[in-house]
Amino acid sequence: MTRAPRRFTARVLTRGTLVILAAACACRPPATELHIVALRDPSLPRRYFSRFDESYFRFDALGNLDLVLRGVNESPSETGEVITEVVHVHAFWEPIPGRTFADASMTNAKVAYSITTEVVAMQYEGGGFLSFKLDEKKHRIQGRLESAQLVPTHRRGDAHDLFGPARVTGTFTATDDARHVVRILNELKNVIGVEAEEATAGR
């Protein structure tokens, strides 16, 4: 099984376009990031990771959690494309240690991971387990995304499916900001668009 390089991980969104995902630095505190095991070729799983500059959350009227992570990187290729990654996790209930039986094999959240440019987009969706802790002032949460299983679901343009089915884990620190959650999700909806076709793993 291959391991992600220490300095950075790269992947292809469109054929021939190299996308830098994240830079690792051991001297900094743990960042908001995803770790991805791509199973496009089950006999040769590949590992990737990505870090995010923005992370926000809100609780809806039913008390469910919406967590949104967003990262923007410029492609190092001559095209100069801007690559945007958005993760949306909608958690249905909050595990309570000692009162609720909860472990990483359970599912309590819907997970959507989107990679987009101005002209193409690829989206992966599935279920996972989210655990988090609200800080004393209730303005920030820290937590983990565990055991998420994603598959490609939507494609716009000639986007290349690098991952196929994938296992995703991650850590995050997010700020309470409903306005930014709504903004990012609306922007994503406009980019993915109703014209996005259903994706088939392996394309």
Image (cartoon, helix red, strand yellow):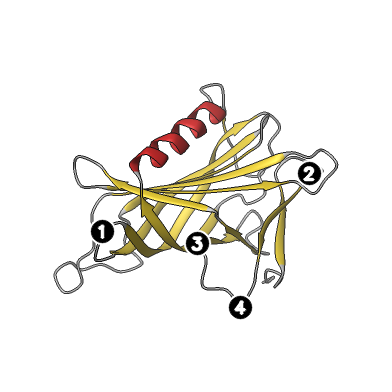
Eye-nearest disc, 4 or 2: 4
User: Which of disc 1 and disc 2 is earlier in sequence?
Assistant: 2
Residue position for label 1:
138
N-terminal label among 3 and 4: 4
- Classify 10 Å Cα crowding around label 4: few (below 14), some (14-19), many (20 and above): few
Name of the residue lying farthest toward the top: 195
Left of 78 or right of it: where is 182?
left
| Residue type marked 3 | Thr
Label 3 environment density (alpha carbons within 10 Å; few <14, some 14–19, many ≥20): many
Disc 1 crowd, CA 10 A, few/some/many (<14, 14-19, 20+): few
Hey, what amino acid is under mark 4?
Cys
Tell me the CA gap for discs 1 and 3: 18 Å
Q: Nearer the viewer, residue 70 or 14?
A: 70
Q: Can you identify the residue that label 2 sits on?
A: 17
Q: Earlier in the sequence, mark 1 or mark 4?
A: 4
Towards the viewer: 55 or 50: 55
Say whether marks 1 and 4 touch (CB < 8 Å).
Answer: no
| Drawn side of residue 108 relative to residue 87, left or right | left
Q: Amino acid at mark 2?
A: Thr
Per the model, the C-alpha gap separating discs 4 and 2 is 30 Å
Q: Is residue 203 visible?
A: no
